[in-house]
Image (cartoon, rainbow, N blue to C red):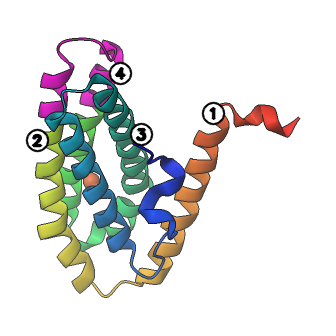
């Protein structure tokens, strides 16, 4: 598996005019990664898919929590609040998975639960929240620009955290 954080969205960059499309692409990517994890018997494939799931969910969580949800809160406050609660539950599951270690026999069960929670949440966003945001008449390009900037920052932060800072000296 060759996907890494720099290949997000097929290398095409953030679709600034269609920020909801960017989020849908993340959802599709994570769904595919869950399929690879859950349908493979090959430990190397599972481990790589697992790492990609954690990394992509953390990025997506930060993007939605920090920029997207606050900006769209007024489109449906109680729906956005409940989405935030679901994110918190997912973050707790991510912490549990990271604490377990990749060779723990409970991993499969945890990833299965994580997949169910994430895909249920994705359905709420795509079926309920996104249509409300689309109907709200808000400036999508302004939202997209802000999300793009946040994500670019996050990704360069992750890249330097992964050891590329040595190259700068
Ligand atoms: Fe999402
Ligand atoms: Fe979300």
Mark 3 — residue?
Answer: 55
Q: Nearer the viewer, residue 164 or 43?
A: 43
| Mark pair 2, 3: CA separation | 18 Å
Which quarter of the figure has residue 9?
bottom left
* 149 within the magenta span: no
Q: Quadrant of the C terminus?
A: top right
Residue 122 falls left or right of residue 21: left
Q: Is residue 136 above or below residue 59?
A: below
Q: Nearer the viewer, residue 10 or 130?
A: 10
Residue 132 falls left or right of residue 24: left
Please identify the residue farthest to the bottom as the structure is shown: 137
Q: Residue at x 25, y 11 (%)?
A: 104
Mark 1 — residue?
Answer: 161
| Among the two numbered marks 2 and 1 on one chain, the one whose residue lies closer to the N terminus | 2
| Residue 78 visible, this orientation | no
The region drawn magenta spans: 92-114
| Residue 117 visible, this orientation | yes
Image spot of residue 144 (x, y percent) = 46, 74
Q: Residue at x 32, y 36 (%)?
A: 49
Answer few, some or many: residues within 10 Å of disc 1's Cα (few below 14, many 20 plus, some between 14 and 19): few
Which quarter of the figure has residue 72?
bottom left
Residue 98's tag is: 4
| Among the two numbered marks 4 and 2 on one chain, the one whose residue lies closer to the N terminus | 4
Q: Quadrant of the N terminus?
A: top left
Mark 2 — residue?
Answer: 116
């Amino acid at each position: 598996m060759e996907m890494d954080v720099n290949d997000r969205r097929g290398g095409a960059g953030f679709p600034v005019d269609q920020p909801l499309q960017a989020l849908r692409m993340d959802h599709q990517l994570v769904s595919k990664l869950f399929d690879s994890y859950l349908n493979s018997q090959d430990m190397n494939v599972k481990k790589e898919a697992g790492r990609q799931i954690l990394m992509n969910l953390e990025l997506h969580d930060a993007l939605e929590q920090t920029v997207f949800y606050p900006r769209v809160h007024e489109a449906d406050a109680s729906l956005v609040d409940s989405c935030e609660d679901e994110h918190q539950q997912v973050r707790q599951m991510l912490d549990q998975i990271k604490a377990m270690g990749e060779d723990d026999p409970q991993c499969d069960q945890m990833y299965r639960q994580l997949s169910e929670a994430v895909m249920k949440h994705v359905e709420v966003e795509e079926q309920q929240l996104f249509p409300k945001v689309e109907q709200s008449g808000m400036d999508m390009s302004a939202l997209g620009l802000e999300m793009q900037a946040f994500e670019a920052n996050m990704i360069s932060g992750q890249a330097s955290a992964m050891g590329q800072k040595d190259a700068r000296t």
